[in-house]
Amino acid sequence: MNETQGNTLNEALETLPLVAILRGITPEEVEGVCEALVGAGFRMIEIPLNSPRPWESIERAVAHCPASVLVGAGTVLEGADAERLARLGAPLMVTPNSDVEVIRAGVDHGLAPMIGCMTPTEALAAARSGARALKLFPAARLGTGYFKDINAILPPDLPVLAVGGIERGNMAEWHAAGVRGFGFGSNLYKPGRDTDEIAEIAADLVAEWHRLEDRGSEG
């Protein structure tokens, strides 16, 4: 990750730590969907590798999105994928699990590993291996009480994003519990959804984040 990408990542994690997860997207629709998301304010876009022709979609998304938006891959399971992401200029590397070898491959290639975890063992292993953020998954099934328990032993400067079952209606509960960001999947994007609808949903999610942050700063 170059200095500009590093600054962009830090800014996104500090100001708008919301990740759009485009599972199932095709290269033919990726540019329109990215445009809708960027227009709504999203700064991080994840294209899972179990989507159709994911590398073509990632390449198109990187070319289409402005430099202020970070694009990358989700469901990264192999260390070899880190080199390919680096070549495409796609710095986000999101995993569903805490595989130390995959995390270190991402770090070695200058990527920003956002690492999926559930247990304290997984979370701390990811932190020690160089994760830039943790992804608590499946968040909604685990609940905010579980998050509070494990968050007490995590490094305080390592952001935790809640992913899985998160939507506008439960963002406030998680934000109050101390979560530092969110990943949105099928409630934001699903294959074939109209881009105008995606833009509207995305704008609502961004507005809710800002509302929660503003309310927190007032309190």
Image (spheres, rainbow, N blue to C red):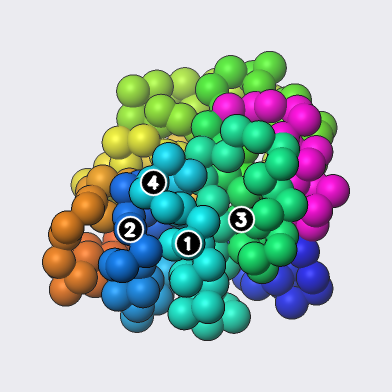
Lower position in the chain sequence, tag 3 or tag 4: 4
The label shown at residue 46 is none
Q: CA distance from mark 4 to mark 2?
A: 7 Å
Q: How many marks?
A: 4
Residue 125 visible from this viewpoint: yes
Q: Is 124 above or below relative to 52? A: above
Q: Which mark is residue 26?
A: 2
Identify which amino acid the numbered label 4 is placed on.
Ser
Residue at (72, 38) in percent of width and height: 79
Say whether disc 4 or disc 1 marks the residue closer to the N-terminus.
Answer: 4
Q: CA distance from mark 2 to mark 3?
A: 19 Å
Magenta segment, which residues?
A: 97-112
Q: Locate residue 88 relative to residue 23 in the image: left or right.
A: right
Which residue bears the numbered disc 4? 51
Neighbour tally class for label 3: few under 14, some 14-19, many 20 plus, Cα within 10 Å: many
Residue drawn where x is 66% and y is 22% of the image = 122
Sooner in the amino-acid sequence: mark 4 or mark 2: 2
Image spot of residue 32 (x, y percent): 30, 75
Identified by mark 3, the residue type is Leu
* Numbered circle sitting on residue 92: 3
